[in-house]
Each structure stands twice: as structure tokens, then as C-alpha cells.
Amino acid sequence: MSGSITIAGLGPGAEALVTPEVTAALAEATDVIGYIPYVARVAPRPGLTLHPSDNRVELDRSRHALELATEGRRVVVVSSGDPGIFAMASAVFEAVEAGPVAWRDLDIRVLPGITAMLAAAARAGAPLGHDFCTINLSDNLKPWALIERRLELAAQADFAMAFYNPRSKSRPEGFARTLEVLREACGDARPVIFARAVSTPEEQIRVVPLPRCRPEMADMRTMVIVGNSATRIIERAGAPIVYTPRSVPA
Amino acid sequence: MSGSITIAGLGPGAEALVTPEVTAALAEATDVIGYIPYVARVAPRPGLTLHPSDNRVELDRSRHALELATEGRRVVVVSSGDPGIFAMASAVFEAVEAGPVAWRDLDIRVLPGITAMLAAAARAGAPLGHDFCTINLSDNLKPWALIERRLELAAQADFAMAFYNPRSKSRPEGFARTLEVLREACGDARPVIFARAVSTPEEQIRVVPLPRCRPEMADMRTMVIVGNSATRIIERAGAPIVYTPRSVPA
């Protein structure tokens, strides 16, 4: 029997946002591997072995998945959101490239999912309706100076911006500095969306003008979206609608 | 009875990529509105009125949807991919902002979907596994000079890039110029993914080094993804794997 490895996106949290393709892959899996809270979203059943692992062991986890697949297992590596956006797919391919040549011939598939920025944008309106960029604000795997340079160039390009991993207990300073860079580069006009735990019972959406943003408004479960210079706010009785128009006048 | 308007993403084409949330919204709709090929993906049933309309009438379509909702209908506006990414959500909110104040109090929801860049990236590997930007290459609604400036700044930021609407019969020149700008700004090293009609029976994925890209490789059904300077290609018996590593060395 030949094994396979499927890198699947579970979406931001709600079961109604898991694609049927991913549900089908999980139903056929012999092994599910991933970070503890994501594996916890998969129901146990006979014939399925769950392999929850801690955070920050992405390469070990990837090698484990690849080894199981070479033994003929049908392995699903689960990510939250989309596996290709700051999640497990790149880690698995890093392991493939550095590993035995035989790993290259495995049946490897990536199944897309609803990544956090799409779910967060949908809840707020349509802040990513025009050109935008997507930046991982964690400097665990890249120099902070590169992040700042990207923020400055993104502001010059007048991109809306979606930020993953804005702030953690071990990195409290980066997001504060991000807000400073944006205030210098963008002026005061931009609305900022703090979307926490979107599609879960703990969901919270806040829309805050850039000058009034404080670092504590974000944590690791928060997706931050910054509008571009044309982003609009429609005030109404409930939560405001934030959207970026499609057009830029000539 | 109070009406509602739901702006729903159907994903790139395959039914297995439609979220259960969107399927449920379609099952409860009284009216489905959208561009002809997207409305054609919704099965007719008693009690459901389908309103297919031509391309480039997004504001008319949005106003029609809003009017039906004020009459108490449960309206679903369908987009392919994700409605918030170069699709119908911004158009509906433009209509809301310009329309009668009563439209602001309607029950309006956006349901995210698998946008083309996620599906295309998944098929190729993980080219968007590090910071990236997303640009609509159509200059129907913005000046071409702005697109060129964004391309140059994105290259300076060393973003991977995802391009929507790269080329159409009425705009044959823009993508040729895009390739020229990228060759000047990025040098020769970058791989380019041409992902056509992803998840449909006509799907075709090609990976081409930037110097060998030709404008004719893209059309309006093609998603183009350009790697960043660190993007890797893993050669193997089948299609190569293209991925962008998570790390940038200090």
C-alpha cells in the first residue's frame, strides 16, 4: 500500500468553514498530525491515530508525517486557516527538500482553507477589496529590520495590510513598533480592524482609527487589518462596515 | 418579514471547495444574484429566483440585490472565490454607502470563500508561505501607473506576488509590461506559476522561470503567482513543488 500526505486547512475555527474536501480527507486518514489545539478539532474514531504536538516543532512534526507516509499511512497534517499562509505547508516542503530523495515521490497534496484574513475581512466588511499585502509580524524566523522595511514599502504602495501573529508574550515590542512605523508612514486616516478569534464563540471585532490603536489591542489570536488611504467606514446602528473601494481615480 | 443580503464566495470552481456555511445560505435564499457563470453553479429549486447578469454591471447588480432585500427577500449575491478579494463585496458596500440610508440597516453578511490565490498556491506547493502581496492587474478601475509603482515597491520589499485578472482580450498589453517591470526589478531568479481554472476539469498548472515567461501564458482564467527571491523548486518525477521558506536568515 502506498502512503500519502495531505496538508489540510481547517479554517479559522467554525466547522461551517471547513471545506468538504478537507472533511473527506480527514474521514480517510489513518493519522492526523498537528499542533495540539488543531488536532483537538478532529473527532477520534477507530482506525485513526491522533498525533498532537507542541507549538514551534514544525520541522520535527513534518518529518514525522513524512516518515509515516513512507510506511504506507494516509497522513493528514492539519493547520488552522490555510496551510499555505504562515502555516504547515512550507514547513513540510522544507523537510521534503532536506530529507531523503524518496520523500519527493510521495503522494503529497495541499488542501486550501479559509485563512484568517479572509474570515476577518468578511466580518468587518471588505477591507481587502483592493490591492493589499500580507505580513507575518513574528520575527522568530526573520530579522525585525526586514519587517519594518516591508511596512514602509507597503505604506508607499498604499496597500491595505493584513498582519498575522501581531503580538505574543515573548514578543511584546514588535507590534508597538509596527504602530509607530504606520503612524509615521500613513498619517492618521487609516482604520485598523482587530479581529480576534473569528468564527469562534470568543469572536471580537473592533474598528479603531490608527492614532488610537494601542499594542494591547492585539494578541496571538488577533488578526489585524489596516485599510489603505481610500478605505471607507459606513456608520450604522450596529457595527460599522469597513470597505476599500475597487476604484482609484486617475 | 425582514430581508437580508448575504455576499457569498463559491470558491474557485469545485463543489468540494464550497464551505458548508455558503451551502446553507444558498439553501435558504429566495433570490440569487450574480455574474452569469456563477449563478449557473446554483441549482434551481421551487421558491428560488435566479438573477444572472452580465459582467461589469457590479453596481447595478448590487443595487438590485439591496432593493430586493428591502422588500423582505433573502438575497444571496454570489462571487467566485472569496467575495472580499476583487469581487462583489466592495461593490455592494459602495452601493450601500451611496444609496438610501435605510440600506445601512439591512441584515448584511459576507461569507468568505476559497479565493483563487489560495487554491492556486496549494496546487503548486506553498509559494505564499512567507510575506506576499496581492494585486489586481486590471486597469479598468485604476491608473496603470499605480500598478507599475506597486510592482516596483513589491519587488523592493521582496514580496511574493499574486496577480488577479492578469490579461484579457481588451487589455493585452498590461501583463507584457508587468513581466518587463518584474524582469528589471527582480532579476532572473524568480519562478512564476501560471494556474489556470484551478479545481475545474480545465485546470492547468505551469511553472516557468521569469525570463521565459510570455504574456500569452496568461488569460482571464489564470492566476499568476511570482515567488520571492528565496522561493525554491523541488524537482521530482511529477510536477515540481514550488514553495517559499518561512525563514529569512539574519
Image (spheres, coloured by chain):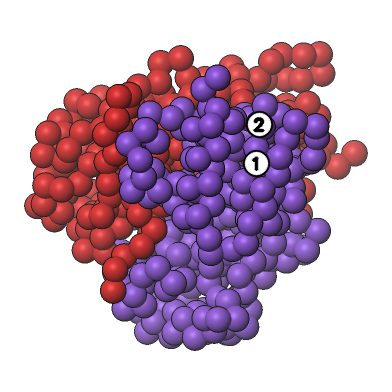
Chain colours: A purple, B red
Q: Decide: is B54 above or below B98.
A: above
Q: Is residue A13 left or right of residue B119?
A: right
Q: Decide: is A10 above or below A108.
A: below
Q: Amino acid at mark 1?
A: Val
Are the residues tagged 2 and 1 within 8 Å (C-beta)?
yes
Q: Nearer the viewer, residue A31 or A237?
A: A31
Residue B202 coordinates in the image, percent (x, y): 41, 16
On the question of residue B84 being in view, the answer is no
Q: For mark 1, does the 10 Å Cα neighbourhood hold few (<14), some (14 to 19), or many (20 or more) residues?
A: many
Q: For mark 2, does the 10 Å Cα neighbourhood hold few (<14), some (14 to 19), or many (20 or more) residues?
A: many
Q: Quadrant of residue A24?
A: top right
Q: Quadrant of residue B123?
A: top left
Protein chain holding label 1: A
Q: CA distance from mark 2 to mark 1?
A: 7 Å
Give the residue pinned by disc 2: A29
* SS at mark 1 in the image: strand
Q: Nearer the viewer, residue B121 or A186?
A: B121
Q: Decide: is A95 above or below B35.
A: below
Protein chain holding label 2: A
Q: Is residue B220 left or right of residue B106?
A: left
Q: Residue at x 49, y 40 (%)?
A: A66
Residue B248 coordinates in the image, percent (x, y): 31, 65
Q: Decide: is B5 above or below A222.
A: above
Q: Quadrant of the C terminus of chain A?
A: bottom left
Residue A174 coordinates in the image, percent (x, y): 47, 81
Q: Residue at x 77, y 14 (%)?
A: B45
Give the residue pinned by disc 1: A32
Q: Quadrant of the N terminus of chain A?
A: top right
